[in-house]
Each structure stands twice: as C-alpha cells, then as structure tokens.
Amino acid sequence: MTALRPPLRQLLLKLHPRSNSHPQAALSRRTYSNNKHGDGPPTPIDIDAIRAKMLSRPPQIWHDDLHPHNSRLLDTALADFLPASCQPLRLHQEQLPAAHHLLYFPLRLPGSALCPDGTDPYHKPAEPAFARRMWAGGSIRDLDAPLALDGRPAVCVERIADVSARGAPGAEKIFVEVSREYVDREGLSTAAGVEHGTVPTGVGISERRTLVFMRMMDKEARKQALATSLKGSGKALKVPIAPDFSVTLTPTPTLLFHYSALTYNAHAIHLDRAYCREEEGHRDLLVHGPLALTLMLSVLRSRLASGNNSESIHGIDYRNFAPLYVNEPLRVCVALKGGKPRETENEEGKSNGTAKKQGGIEQDGGAGEKPKQLIRRKWDVWVENKDGGLSVRGTAESRGVPGHGD
C-alpha cells in the first residue's frame, strides 16, 4: 500500500481534517463492566445523546492500492470449501469480484488502540457496558462498478450514518449504521458531492453495515448463555422455499484465521475460543458476517455463470439471524425469486427446474442508437446452519445482457 498521490490527498482532506488521536482510543485500556450500580438493574441509556455524539464523529478516510494479491489469496483460502464454479473468472484485466472489496481498506490502528475484544472503537458507543458487538446485516449497491485490480489507488470514506436503540429500558441493544463509499482515483476526481462523503451511482461501491452492540453479561448470564448455545439452536427458523442451487461446507479454524488476516480483523469471537465461551457465551468460534456474505455472493456467481445470460451481481440486502460456528456444516442456498415451496426440492438440493422466472428486460440506448436489452433479476440467497435453521438471508439483484452467456 502506498501513500496517496498529492492531488488525491488534497482532495480528500476537504472531507475532514484528521486528528492525531482516535475518538475512542482510551476505551481500549478499560475493563468493561456490566454497567450496574451495586446489585441494582442496568442503567437505562439516553439514546438521543448517544446518537448525537456518534453522528458528530468525523468520517474515516482509508486509502489503498487495488492490487489483485488479496483477492487471489481469498480464492486460495476458499478453494477447499467451494467448487471451482464459485471462483471469480480471472481475466487479463481483472475486475474487483463481488464482496472482495471487503479485503481492502483495512483498519489502520495498532492493537493498543483497539477495543478489548479487538474491534474498531470508531463504531462503538462510548458507554463502557456496550462491549459485545455483532454484525447484524447490511446492504451493498453497485457491486458491478468498474473497479479494476490493476494497482490503481482507491479510497473508502466511512461515516456513522445512524444510531438507534431497541429493547426495554435497561435491556436495550444499540444499532449503529455505518456507511462506506468506495471509489478509485479516476472516479473520485469526477464525483460530484464527494466532499460530503458520497459517491454517485455507477462510480463506485456503496455499502451500509448494521452493527449491534449489547451489554456485557454477568457471570451467571454468561453461564446460562453457554449452556443454551451448547444445547443447540432449538426451534429453527426455516426458509419456506427450495434452493435452485446449494453448496454445503464446513468452515475450519484455518479458514477463519485466513479471513481475519486478509481483512485485518482482530475480533476475538473469530479467533479466541476461550473468549467466546467465557465472555460471550458462545460454544465455539463464530464465522465472520462478511465471510458469510462472501460465501452467498460466491455461490450466486456460480449460479449466474451456469445460465445463458451474461450477468453480474449488482447489489444485495441481507440480515443475520443466528450465529454460524466453526467446525459445523452450513449450507449456502440460491433461488430465483418466485421459486417453488421447499417440499419440491430434490434430495441433493440441486436445481429442480421449477423456479418461475422473475425480473424483466429493459431497453437501453442513447438517441440514434439501437436499444440494448438489459436483464434484471432478483434472487433469494441464504445460509442454513447444521440443523437446517436460517442463519443469514438476503435478496440480491443481478444485471446483464440476455443470451450472451457461456
């Protein structure tokens, strides 16, 4: 990764001057409590005050050079878990594959400046009690934006977009919406409004992440949570449709380590089994939310490649419902919107040929040009845990040209 070129640096500094101190660096040196006064109940929070403080935080500006190295390393890490059809097509002029933007623009903080669980303090509410963080979901648009892996410099602008609370007083969860915009130097130089941290549609990738922060548990609560986790998922939420295509795999500690390393992610729930069990009440290491997202988009890419259209993934909205654990099988599923009910699925979970076509064909073309046919289709994508229960579910959109596939 190289330093920003002078013209690009000057343009980015318009976004916000960077201070030498991180707004929450001091938090990394604290030991979190469960926010109790003696033996009394947890103190209710002032969410309006929390929101105001967090929204006032300046944007974070990360820069990187888009070399293919990290992207290819992810292909290597996933090679033992996904069929070859799920791997991106590597051409002479490589484009950034869907979800591979997550490997770039890493957090640049030393370990001493991270939260005690290894996460980014920029995203965390200042209240010490809210020290447990989970990835709740998000959305991505313009995944098919023309970002080439040719070493070009690029920029990610990150900001806190919204903060809200859910739950009864004293038992709230704080939801933090994080906005991230990705654009290369060429796009940045022409993007109107980039001074405000926005990137026009088609110039770069727009992402929204939803993070949820929960109170630390006392010893008895942790013990109970671990017992519940060890018992299993109980009554599992099921997706009422059958997949057209699915891939089953079992994530290993090595895969989780590789993904943590590639994304420069030190969150202890992916790396430290003792922490998972003793501090957060989970039976084992958790699969990363972004890794589950990457698996869904990789399997969808395979499904698109098997058709007759030349399509790429444009966007996705997704939500995480339940944890996925290391060394436990999971199944990644894809179905065209409007598929048949689940009972029509065959034993192998392969295409049953019954999905109803959804989406539409549009006409595109300027004045005096022959209109082009463009296809847009919607897809259900989801991940099931070892018990067949729903862990992640999303809706993806593909775009392309009809009848020009392999």
Image (spheres, grey):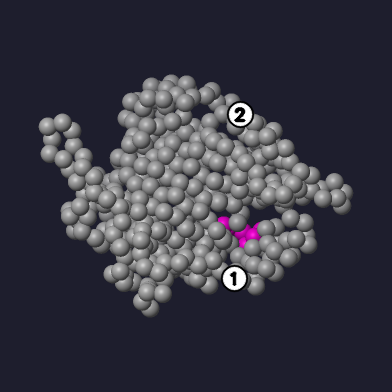
Point 76% across, 48% down: residue: 170
Circles 2 and 1, Cβ within 8 Å, touching? The answer is no
Residue type of the residue flagged with mark 1: Lys
- Label 1 sits on a secondary structure element that is loop
Q: Residue at x 72, y 49 (%)?
A: 168
Residue 30, image x and y in percent? Answer: 73, 43
Q: Which residue is denoted by mark 2 in the rendering?
A: 56
Residue name at image x 53 percent, y 40 percent: 178
**Magenta span of residues:** 270-276
Mark 2 → mark 1, Cα distance in angstroms: 42 Å
Q: Quadrant of the N terminus?
A: top left
Q: Main secondary structure of the magenta part?
A: helix
Reply yes or no: does residue 273 show up in magenta: yes
Q: Is residue 17 left or right of residue 50?
A: left
Q: Residue 3 at x, y = what percent?
A: 43, 31
Residue 156 sits above or below residue 233 on the image: above
Residue at 66% over, 40% down? 125
Which amino acid, mark 2? Ser
Q: Position of residue 387 (x, y in %)?
A: 53, 72
Label 2 vs label 1, nearer the camera: 1
Question: Which quarter shows the C terminus?
Answer: bottom left
Does residue 307 show up?
A: yes
Q: Earlier in the sequence, mark 2 or mark 1?
A: 2
Judging by the rendered image, the residue that carries numbered circle 1 is 235
